[in-house]
Amino acid sequence: MKFTLDETQNNRLLAAIFQELAVIVFDPQKEVVFANANMTDILGYSQEEIIGLPHRTFCFDHYAVSTDYQAFWNQLLYSKQRFQDKIIRKNKQGEKLILEGIYFPVLDEQQEVVNVVKIAFDITQREQALAVTIKKVQESAASLTRLSANGHQQVDHLSENLAQVKRLSDQNQATTHALEMDSQQVTAVLHDIDRIAQQTKLLSFNASIETARIGEQAAGFRVVADEMQKLAEQTKQLTQTIATTMQAINQQALVVLDSTDSTTMKISDSQKSLAAVLHSYDTLRTTASLLNDEAEYLTETNDAELETT
C-alpha cells in the first residue's frame, strides 16, 4: 500500500526534520538561502548573517581553492548526485568543525538544480574524543613495547647469568668427579701400603723367631727386626689415618656432587621458565605492535576521509 502525505502531514514532517536536524539550503550560485536554528548554532552565525553567504565562507582556504572542492560542486550541480561523507568546515570564529553531512540537489520540472540541501550532524566532540583515544592507545602501545623491550633485555641478561652459572656448575661437577676418581686411586694405593706393612710386620715377626733361635750371635739382626716391626706399625697407623681422611673427603665430594646435580637441575628448570617468560614478552611486544598498527590505520583512515572534504 502506497503511503502519501497530505499538506498538513508534509508540513509536520518538515517541521520535525528542521527541529531535530541541522539544515542549510544553497542556491545554484552556492549561496545560502536558508538555514535553520540548529545549523546557525553550529556555524556560529545568526540567521540574518548567514543568508547570502557563499558556501566557501564555511571552508578553509586550502580546500576552497582545490580541485576537490570544484569536483564536489560539479557532482551536485551537474551530475546531480548526492554527496555524503565526513567533512571539515569552520565556524564564524574560524574554529574547525567536523561534520557528518549529506548534500543533495533539489530539481525542478525540467530536472534542473534549483537548490542544494545539506543536512549535517556535528561530530566535532566525538572526533576529538576519538583522536584523544587513538593517542592514548598509541601511547599505551609504545609503553607496552618499551616494557617488553626492557623486560626482554633483563631476562636475556639473567638467562646469560644462569648459563654462566650452569657452565661453572658443570665444571664443578666434572672436578668433583675427577676428585672422586683420585680419591679412589689414593684408597687403592693405601690398600697396597697397608698390605706391604702387614708383610713387613710378618717378616719382622719371622726374623724375631729366627733371632731367638740363633741366640746372641744374631744380636744385630734383632735390632733390624725390631726396627722393621716399628716401621710396619707406624706405616699401618699412617695408612689408617690417611684412609680415614680420604673417606671423609670422598663423602664430602659425594655431597658436593649431589648438590651440584640438584643445582644443575634447578638451573635447567629456571632456564625453561625464563624461556616461557621471554615468549610472553614477545607476545606482549607483538600485541603492542598490532595495537599501534590498528591505531595508526584508524588515524590515517580518519585523516584521509577528512582530507577529501
Image (tube, rainbow, N blue to C red):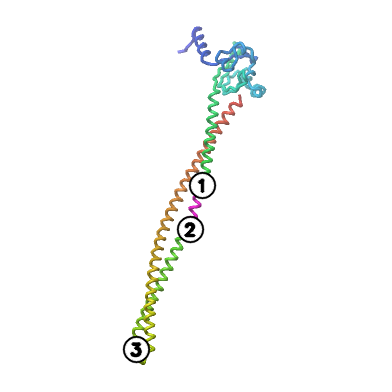
Name the residue furthest bottom.
Answer: 217
193 lies above or below 5 = below
Which residue ends up furthest to the right in the rendered image?
A: 65
Dot label at residue 43: none
Indicate which disc, 1 or 2, sits on the residue closer to the N terminus: 1
What crowding class fits label 3: few (fewer than 14 Cα within 10 Å), some (14-19), or many (20 or more)? some
Q: Earlier in the sequence, mark 1 or mark 3?
A: 1
What amino acid is at disc 2? Answer: Leu
Is the residue under label 3 in contact with that under label 2 (CB below 8 Å)?
no
Foreground tag (1 vs 3): 3
Q: Distance between the residues labelled 1 and 2?
A: 21 Å
Report the disc number at residue 154: 1
Q: Which residue is drawn at 41% across and 69% down?
A: 184
Residue 159 sits inside the magenta stretch: yes
Q: Residues within 10 Å of mark 2 (few under 14, many from 20)?
A: some
**Label 1 neighbour load within 10 Å: few <14, some 14-19, many 20+:** few
Task: Report how far apart the C-alphas of labels 2 and 3 lie in the structure.
Answer: 63 Å
- Which amino acid lies under the numbered mark 1 shown in the image of this protein? Gln
Q: What element carries label 2?
A: helix
Residue at image x 47%, y 56%?
Answer: 166
Residue stretch rendered in magenta on the structure: 152-166
**Tally of numbered discs:** 3
Q: Mark 3 points at which residue?
A: 211
Q: Where is residue 109 in the image (x, y as percent from the top left)?
A: 59, 10
86 vs 16: above or below: below
Q: Is residue 15 visible?
A: yes
Give the amino acid at mark 3: Thr
Say which residue label 2 marks. Answer: 168
Residue 202 coordinates in the image, percent (x, y): 34, 82
